[in-house]
Each structure stands twice: as structure tokens, then as C-alpha cells.
Amino acid sequence: MIKTPTDQYQDIRDAVRALCAEFPDDYHRRIDAERGYPEAFVDALTKAGWLAAMIPQDYGGSGLGLAEASVVMEEINRSGGNSGACHGQMYNMGTLLRHGSEAQKELYLPKIASGQWRLQSMGVTEPSTGTDTTKIKTTAVKKEGRYVVNGQKVWISRVQHSDWMILLARTTPLAEVKKKTEGMSIFMVDLRQAEKSGMTVRPIANMVNHETNELFFENLEIPEDNLIGVEGQGFKYILDGLNAERALIAAECIGDGYWFIDRVTKYVRERVVFGRPIGQNQGVQFPIAEAYIEIEAANLMRYKACALFDAGQSCGAEANMAKYLAAKASWEAANACIQFHGGFGFANEYDIERKFRETRLYQVAPISTNLILSYVAEHELGLPRSF
């Protein structure tokens, strides 16, 4: 394994690696082949307290920051797993922790920390809006102490394996607000109850083993007490979750990148063709070295984004740049790994094709590389908005 300097998170790394070692490659390979959910793995992470890392100690969590949470996600991916099965609980914490009422925190957080409840889903994206979030059409109309929700969401993951979902819906029509970012609100949705009374779940088969779905809401009633924060300010609240999500995804990509580098460097040292190890050839060395350099650089931006988030400062640019750099680096490492393994890279038993598919996702989601470039051009460089 490529060695990294011992840092302040080494104890976390060692503990997570030890847990992950109990779930070796063949476990994740089998789950992927079955298109299953790694229940045992997620339960083990929950029992060990890792999925409650960001929950304050007063509510039964570890009271750690986004930086520590990102190390957990990184180590899961570096160990050959896929944090996509459980990362939602980490980034969803940002919205609830920063904007939920004290009563809401006392209700939800201890049960989430203990594993009694899972908060793995976030309902934002819609078929006709994509990342143009201000144009969402799902509505929540207040009526006699409750909100009635109608609309549709897509690419909503882990619904079947979560108890609660954070939902973004319009409470004031777009035409009636001064700013397009106003008039949206955030709600806690009891998924099991919703499935019985107005929410239809339609699974989406896809390239990677991410349990994801399309959701349809027809007069779904949500108690007024499930509103997080002030009505109409949900877009501002959801940004905390989205920035945390991008930093955590960056960490996962970094973990993937190191996994690919570990695998390919070991293989090219041992694989002998024409009487010499293929790793002796510069044509093999250079792509691997370049990917490694990019992973190391992405790692630094990840920590900068996390530090700003944990300090309560603006981190939109840093979280986006960390995600961009890490996704690009992991994809380059994946390409080098599969290329230099030759035919073996496509064999299931080597796990490269599985990880190859998994890390490719992050060029597209949770925000595409092109939109990150547009964001940086506009907000960091002062260039005219391009869309």
C-alpha cells in the first residue's frame, strides 16, 4: 500500500481499516453481483459509531467534524468498499445540525446515532430541472397544521434502506418570490409512513450498484413540525448539506484513487513481459505517477474545504474544487489501473472493473465537472454567468 504521512487522523484510519478488513473484496464483489445492499457492513459501521461521527456527543454521537468524517469515507473506499451505501447520513447531518430546532435534534439525532433510525436520503433532484434547483416543481402547500406535497424526484438513493429523507419542495411559487432562491423549504419525511400514504417509489436500474429511485408524491401529508428552520429558506439550508456532500465525495474519490494506485503499482512491478517488469517502462510509469500527483493535490483541497466547513465559513468554491480535482484524479488512476492490468482488469475477481464503474460516477454526480467549472468561472473569477 502507498504510504502516506502519519497525521492527526491516524487513529481513525487504523480503526476504520480494521473494521473494513472484516469485509474483504469478495464481500463487496458479491454484493455488487447481487445488486444488493451491504447491510452487514453498514450495520458494523453504525455499531462502531462511524456514521454518527458528526453528531454532537450530547446527542449520542462522536462530535467530530467534516474532516474526520471525510477520513472515514476515504478509508472505506481505499479498503475496496463503496461509501455510496452510507455517505448520505454524513452529509445530511449538515442541514439538520445547523438549521434544525432543538426539539428536532433531540428527537432525531440520538436515534440516528444509535442506529435505530437511518437518515440516508436527500430528495432534491427532479427530472426536468437537474441541477437547476431553483426551478423545482415539487410543491408543499400548508393546510391546517400540515404540508401537502405533490411532485416528483429522481436519482434519490437509499430510500429502501433509510427511515428518513430530507426533502426540498417549493412552498411559495417561483413567480411570487423576489429571488429565485427563496420560497423553498426543507422537510423531514418519514419514508416508511410516506410509502403508505402518498409516495410511490420506482427503482432505477443503473450502471453501478447504487440503490437509487424515482419518487412520486400525490397529496403526501407531512406534519408541520417536520419543517426544518424557517419556511422559504430551504435552499440556503440545503447548501450546507451539498457542500458537505462534495467534500465527502472528494474524500471517497481520493480513497478510490489510492486503491487504484496501490493495485496497479503492485501489479506492474510483478508483471513481466519481454523479460522485464512492465513497470520499468516510462509509458507505464508516467500515467501512474501523474494520477498519484493529482490525488495528492486533491487531498490538500479536500482538507481546506473541510477546515472551512468545520469553522462555519463559506466553502462553496473549495468544496466544488476538491470534488472536481478528486474525481478527475480517481478517474485517471482508474484508467491507468485497468489499462495496465490488460485483460485481467476486466475480470470480476480483480475488483478493478467494479471500482472503475463506481468512481466513474463522480464525473457526473453529485454535480458535473462542467457545472463546477462554470461555478468557479463566475464566482471566483468574476466572469459573466454562462447559463
Image (tube, grey):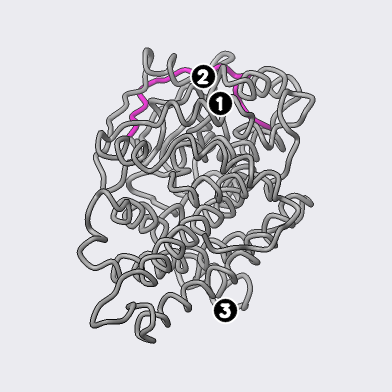
Residue 222 among those drawn in magenta: yes
Q: Give the quadrant of residue 182.
A: top right
What secondary structure is marked by label 1? strand
Q: Considering only vertical position in the picture, is 220 above or below 312?
A: above
Q: Nearer the viewer, residue 4 or 140?
A: 4
Asked if the residue at tag 2 contacts the one at tag 1, i.e. Cβ–Cβ closer than 8 Å, the answer is: yes
Q: Which residue carries the number 2 mark? A: 222
Residue 377 among those drawn in magenta: no
Of discs 1 and 2, which sits in the foreground? 1
Q: Considering only vertical position in the picture, is 19 above or below 373?
A: above
Q: Which residue carries the number 3 mark? A: 383
Residue type of the residue flagged with mark 3? Leu
Q: Compare marks 1 and 2 and give the one earlier in the sequence.
A: 1
Residue 176 lies, in percent from the top left, at 54, 44
* C-alpha separation, residue under disc 3 versus residue under disc 2: 42 Å
- In the rendering, which numbered label is found on residue 234? none
- In the rendering, which numbered label is found on residue 188? 1
Q: Which residues are magenta?
A: 214-230
